[in-house]
């Protein structure tokens, strides 16, 4: 990293401790504060440079040396471009210890970043919470600080709050005393030495559950009053995760307490502040008796992910933001391990395959990026919070873990953490620790994976009594470039599985003609596989004997080949037709993903043919599953029922299914006890038969639903109502303050991806762009517009491209570039496949009646 980067702070003055006092006025939304920063001055300086933005300094600022000399700050120059403050000193400060005292004021903003406000309404009225989200670089909006991950320090925080409200922060409450005029002064225990992006605090009318001691650590859930009934699942996951990670890492939990806080307004899903982990409500609060397994798994993963960060990220931290990917990818992978250990029956790696498929799609674009890249300005880091970091990064670590073996991998992690406690690291430090423990060329393998975009297509070709595996770059636009990867791959020949490293020049394995060859056995490598000739037929015919993840991969690779133009959509449907007996929900979901695309490409009579094809395919399986949960069913059996109801209702347009869904949705809305996965699936299906009355009801359920999951489901279902004028009304709701900013991506994104009325939503987005972009953080905005990826006509494409030509995104622009290229893929798909599909599904076509 070049030291001349003007966004980076000089290291001549380094903080070791902050004593911070803050007071927010929850009526005027202004705060004032004072901070004393204990510094080590390394070289004589006559100015001090630190980060600050949207803050005003004063009245008093000075530097006090360890000898008791006070040097006034005579001028403050704020540079909004680099978000830095230059404090000029009245005279030169000599090297040594010193304390900087700064007073300041700023706004409690409504943009979900820095020190921001969140609101909720109950019987008493409206309540404001002042809370924080600092990552990546918004601590500088709450107090002047050395806002780079490398400047770790201890934080001692005091909050002055109105009597009657409660305050929470990283540290436990150490004291609370009256401060006059209806206020209290609350002081928190010191934090461990940590980075500024991990600071968190919060003031408001909030409740906390009684602390539960888990392995010596008191754990609570913080929530708005009245939601205590939704906290037990989170506490269970927290207890398991704390135990799991303490054991896995071989290091005790690094803080003294752990609060999990559910906030009504929150930009991301959750944030790993040590001691005070913050969440959006839907990512923490849940009623397991009405939630789907997928919803519970997502929440569990989120909690486990943040707890995994307490060590990996918080205790040992990336030196600079280029390390963000490792932090996030690792926590993503760890969450899978933790959840898999907690609920093996949930088969979490199968569900994860669905997330991974998203990363595959983006990574097949020519605009994909390498997982790691150099970060110069803070804006560069915003692009990192995407599927390539989380899902490709997490998958790559899973691939590595499978290659090295779970225990050696864990031992390497333990060594890495133990070597860098309270420190900062580079990515290579982890590879070094893993290499040292395992003796494997970890750095060489992983560097290829993290510094090159894209992923390999492994081609499997029979050569007599051998099978040759070669690699090329997989791409949507035909043959890729010359990029190659040392690729960990498990290959099964007959009954025997071998772990290989497929080098750029390929490998050959022994396999006689009667032996089944499965490349990517277990499905843990981040590769696509192409079997040539009879090898494919053999794997396909053996599908029932494959592991579920291998079946998933077979179908998912096939759909990827369709997008890449290497396989016809008709051939995909023929393959899908063989999977009517499938038992696993994720396998169905990937299959239905491909079929969903086919549905978009068809109209008129051929579409009717397609619908009957889907009914023939999924109907018997739904019949077998039945509509009522059965004694002894697993969570995944119930999940499968929901998936099949969606298939039959949304793609098959099966009239009896729609009727039953309408009944189930009404019953569930009326508070009757309908099984979670069934209620969740019935809702969008019922919506397709809904109208004005349902619109009113769904809008009300967004506010009044019994759980955040139910609220989320209803706001999403609004997009499935068939009337374009209702979609207009739905969209209008996004600007009147009724829908929280944090939920707009689900609502508007859902409308954009609606098969029939996406253009209505797109018109709305264009017209209201300024309002939307001033309301939303860059990430929420880009999530919202990513939906344009499904517009598959050239006219739509030209319109979208022209719009973003004149309305560029200020940040996270690469994610938009990916969405736009995906749109190009969709247009090409339509051009290539729509005609052939229509012919195949038309009366007398080759797919007519094939599903049965
Ligand atoms: N550190 C992130 C939160 C974050 C994301 C901060 C983007 C700043 C910008 C946190 O650990 C995280 O990864 N949260 C995820 C949830 C997780 C389960 C994938 C999120 O918010 O989506
Ligand atoms: Zn994370």
Image: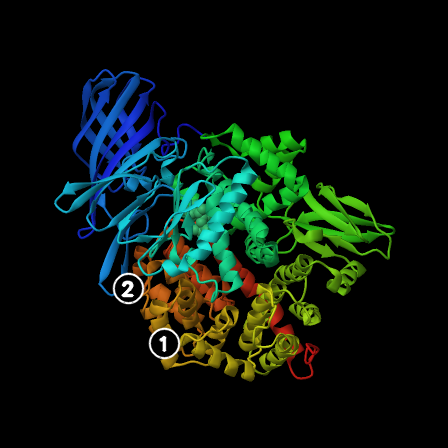
How many numbered discs sit on the rendered protein? Answer: 2
Q: Which residue is label 2 attached to?
A: 737
**Position of the C terminus by quadrant:** bottom right
Q: Please, is residue 805 above or below residue 761 in the view?
A: above
Residue 266 point in image, percent of width and height: 36, 53
Q: Mark 1 and ligand 1: say if the CB distance to the nearest ligand atom is below 8 Å.
A: no
* 534 left or right of 324 in image: right
Residue 814 in view in this figure:
no
* Residue furthest left in the image: 181
In the foreground, 434 or 852: 434
The residue drawn where x is 75% and y is 61% is 545
Contact check, label 1 and label 2, Cβ < 8 Å: no
The image quadrant of residue 687 is bottom left
* Image depth: mark 1 or mark 2 in front: 1
Q: Is residue 329 left or right of residue 104?
A: right
Q: Which mark is residue 251?
A: none
Q: Residue at x 36, y 25 (%)?
A: 11
Residue 594, image x, y percentages:
60, 66
Circle 2: element type: loop
Numbered tag placed on residue 697 in the rendering: 1
Residue closest to the eye, 450 or 250: 250
Q: Is residue 240 above or below residue 39?
A: below
Instruction: Measure how far apart labels 1 and 2 are at the Cα level.
Output: 18 Å
The image shows residue 754 at horizontal and vertical percentages of 46, 70
Q: Where on the picture, by quarter, is residue 344?
A: bottom right
Residue 79 point in image, percent of width and height: 27, 36
Q: Nearer the N terminus, badge 1 or badge 2?
A: 1
Name the one closer to the observer, 116 or 49: 116
Q: Label 1 neighbourhood size at 10 Å, few (<14), some (14-19), many (20+)?
A: some
Which residue appears at 60% of the width and 77% of the height?
626
Q: Is residue 154 visible?
A: yes
């Amino acid at each position: 990293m070049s030291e001349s980067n003007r966004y980076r702070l000089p290291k001549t003055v380094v903080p070791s401790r902050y004593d911070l006092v803050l007071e927010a006025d929850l009526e005027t939304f202004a705060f004032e504060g004072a901070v004393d920063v204990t510094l080590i001055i390394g070289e004589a300086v006559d100015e001090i440079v630190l980060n600050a933005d949207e803050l005003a300094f004063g009245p008093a600022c000075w530097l006090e040396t360890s000898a008791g000399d006070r040097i006034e700050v005579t001028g403050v120059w704020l540079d909004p471009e680099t978000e830095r403050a230059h404090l000029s000193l009245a005279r030169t400060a000599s090297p040594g210890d010193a304390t900087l005292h700064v007073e300041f004021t700023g706004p409690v903003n409504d943009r979900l970043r820095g020190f921001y406000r969140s609101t909720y309404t109950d019987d008493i009225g409206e309540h404001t919470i002042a809370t924080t989200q600092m990552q990546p670089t918004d601590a500088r909006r709450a107090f002047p600080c050395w806002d780079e991950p490398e400047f770790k320090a201890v934080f001692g925080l005091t909050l002055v709050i109105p009597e009657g409200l409660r305050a929470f922060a990283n540290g436990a409450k150490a004291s609370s005393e009256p401060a006059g005029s209806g206020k209290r002064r609350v002081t928190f225990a010191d934090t461990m030495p940590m980075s500024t992006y991990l600071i968190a605090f919060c003031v408001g009318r909030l409740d906390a559950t009684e602390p539960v001691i888990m392995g010596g650590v008191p754990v609570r859930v913080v929530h708005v009053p009245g939601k205590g009934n939704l906290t037990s699942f989170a506490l269970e996951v927290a207890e398991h995760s704390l135990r799991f990670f303490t054991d896995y890492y071989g290091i005790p939990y690094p803080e003294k307490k752990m609060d999990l806080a559910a906030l009504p307004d929150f930009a991301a899903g959750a944030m790993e502040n040590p001691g005070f982990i913050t969440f959006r409500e839907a990512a923490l609060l849940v009623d397991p008796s009405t939630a789907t397994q997928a919803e519970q798994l997502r929440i569990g993963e989120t909690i486990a992910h943040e707890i995994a960060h307490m060590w990996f990220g918080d205790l040992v931290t990336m030196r600079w933001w280029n390390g963000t990917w490792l932090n996030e990818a690792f926590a993503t992978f760890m969450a899978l391990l933790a959840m898999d250990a907690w609920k093996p029956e949930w088969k979490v790696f199968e569900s994860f395959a669905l997330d991974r498929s998203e990363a595959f799609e983006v990574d097949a674009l020519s605009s994909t990026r390498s997982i790691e890249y150099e970060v110069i300005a803070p804006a560069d880091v915003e692009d990192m919070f995407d599927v390539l970091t989380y899902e490709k990064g997490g998958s790559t670590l899973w691939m590595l873990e499978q290659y090295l073996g779970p225990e050696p991998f864990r031992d390497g992690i333990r060594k890495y953490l133990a070597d860098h406690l309270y420190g900062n690291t580079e990515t290579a430090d982890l590879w070094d620790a893993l290499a040292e423990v395992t003796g494997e060329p970890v750095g060489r393998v992983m560097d290829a994976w993290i510094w090159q975009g894209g992923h390999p297509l492994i081609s499997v070709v029979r050569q007599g009594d051998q099978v040759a595996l070669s690699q090329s770059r997989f791409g949507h636009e035909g043959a890729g470039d010359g990029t190659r990867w040392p690729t960990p791959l498990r290959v099964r020949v007959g009954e025997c599985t071998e772990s290989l490293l497929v080098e750029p020049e390929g490998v050959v394995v022994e396999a006689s003609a009667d032996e089944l060859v499965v490349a990517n056995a277990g499905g843990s490598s981040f590769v696509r596989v192409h079997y040539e000739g009879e090898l494919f037929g053999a794997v396909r015919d053996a599908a029932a004997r494959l592991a579920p993840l291998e079946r998933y991969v077979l179908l998912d690779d096939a759909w990827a080949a369709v997008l890449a133009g290497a396989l016809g959509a008709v051939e995909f449907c023929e393959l899908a037709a063989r999977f009517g007996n499938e038992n696993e929900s994720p396998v169905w979901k990937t299959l239905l993903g491909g079929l969903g695309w086919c549905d978009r490409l068809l109209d008129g009579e051929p579409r009717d043919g397609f619908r009957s094809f889907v009914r023939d395919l999924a109907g018997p399986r739904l019949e077998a599953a039945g509509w009522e949960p059965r004694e002894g069913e697993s969570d995944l059996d119930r999940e499968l029922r929901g998936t099949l109801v969606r298939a039959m209702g949304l793609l098959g347009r099966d009239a009896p299914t729609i009727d039953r869904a309408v009944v189930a949705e009404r019953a569930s809305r009326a508070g009757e006890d309908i099984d979670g996965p069934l209620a969740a699936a019935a809702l969008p299906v019922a919506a397709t038969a809904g109208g004005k009355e349902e619109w009113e009801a769904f809008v009300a359920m967004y506010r009044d639903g019994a759980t955040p999951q139910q609220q989320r489901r209803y706001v999403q279902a609004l997009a499935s109502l068939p009337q374009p004028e209702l979609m207009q009304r739905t969209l209008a709701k996004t600007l009147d303050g009724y829908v929280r900013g944090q939920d707009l991506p689900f609502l508007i994104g859902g409308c954009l991806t609606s098969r029939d009325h996406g253009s209505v939503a797109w018109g709305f987005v264009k017209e209201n762009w300024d309002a939307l972009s001033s309301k939303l953080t860059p990430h929420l905005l880009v999530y919202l517009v990513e939906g344009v990826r499904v517009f598959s006509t050239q006219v739509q494409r030209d319109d979208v491209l022209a719009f973003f030509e004149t309305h560029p995104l200020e940040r996270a622009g690469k994610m938009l570039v990916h969405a736009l290229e995906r749109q190009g893929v969709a247009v090409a798909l339509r051009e290539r496949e729509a005609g052939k599909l229509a012919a195949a599904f038309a009366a007398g076509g080759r797919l007519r009646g094939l599903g049965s």
